[in-house]
Image: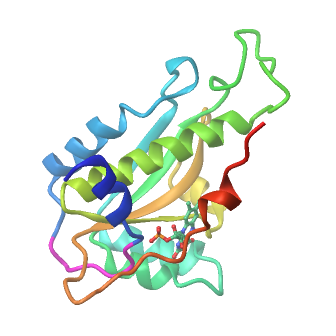
Amino acid sequence: MDAQDCILTRRSVRTFTNQPVSHALLEQVISLAAYAPSWKNTQISRYIAIEDPAVQQAIIDRFCLSGSNNPNIIASAPLLIAQTFVKGRCGFERDGSYTTDRGEGWQYYDCGIAAQTFCLAAHDLGLGTVIMGVFDRKGLESYLQLPEEQELMALIAVGYPDPQLTLSAPKRKEVNELLSWC
Ligand SMILES: Cc1cc2nc3c(=O)[nH]c(=O)nc-3n(C[C@H](O)[C@H](O)[C@H](O)COP(=O)(O)O)c2cc1C
């Protein structure tokens, strides 16, 4: 798959087969995601692989917020990734001050780039993914017993896409709305 195909055909996948994702394949995805650009190459993104159905069920029961379809997505996925990041490096000076007026925001920026690189790599390797942001972050951080120096960023469901799905891309904005020149 070339880069354009990978970008254009990646979709958020919300229904999966029950085929497990091998540890070797996930490691390959992570090794590719590691090539995402990052602030001064700080590489703050981390990934916790959750494949225990009991832990996934606890996340569904206790940390999904009402009104989203995320419980069904997590129930369908054989693998759930908790993307975390190491705090206080990306966007910070050595003395702990912010480098720019973006403050803590560069951390989230770098996580986004890493997550998209993860999702594109997974897609290239035949896996489907969906990034999920709707959950009780603080509650889940505590349940996962994150180290003090890390923060939970997003959940990413991972698995083999249900072959009965035909996913078309949600409509994208036109270039002339996205691009301006000066
Ligand atoms: C930061 C972020 C948070 C998201 N949160 C959710 C979510 O909680 N649940 C969900 O089903 N999809 C979620 N999505 C997926 C978007 O809905 C999806 O990317 C968008 O509709 C475009 O579809 P596509 O990914 O197939 O191109 C999220 C995506 C991003 C980037």
Q: Is residue 76 magenta?
A: no
Q: In the rendered image, which quarter contains the C terminus?
A: top right
At 27% from the left and 59% from the top, the residue drawn is: 123
At 72% from the left and 13% from the top, the residue drawn is: 93
Count the marks: how many?
0
Return the x and y of residue 102 as percentages of the image width and height. 80, 33
Picture quadrant where residue 16 is located? bottom left
Return the x and y of residue 114 as percentages of the image width and height. 46, 42
* Residue 162, placed above or below residue 141: below
Q: Which of 182 and 60 is in front in this view?
A: 182
Picture quadrant where residue 28 is located? top left
* Residue 47, placed above or below residue 81: above
Return the x and y of residue 4 as percentages of the image width and height. 33, 52
At 60% from the left and 54% from the top, the residue drawn is: 142
Asked which colour scheme the image uses, the reply is rainbow
State whether residue 146 appears in this view. Answer: no
In the image, is 122 to the left or to the right of 41? left
Furthest residue toward right: 101
Residue bounds of the magenta highlight: 13-19
At 52% from the left and 22% from the top, the residue drawn is: 42
Q: Which of 39 and 179 is in front in this view?
A: 179
In the image, is 131 to the left or to the right of 64? left
* Residue 17, placed above or below residue 132: below
Return the x and y of residue 122 as percentages of the image width and height. 28, 54
State whether residue 169 appears in this view. Answer: yes
Furthest residue toward top: 95
Picture quadrant where residue 104 is located? top right
Q: Nearer the viewer, residue 137 or 32?
A: 32
Q: Is the magenta stretch mostly helix, strand or loop?
A: loop
Q: Is residue 17 magenta?
A: yes
In the image, is 130 to the left or to the right of 26? right
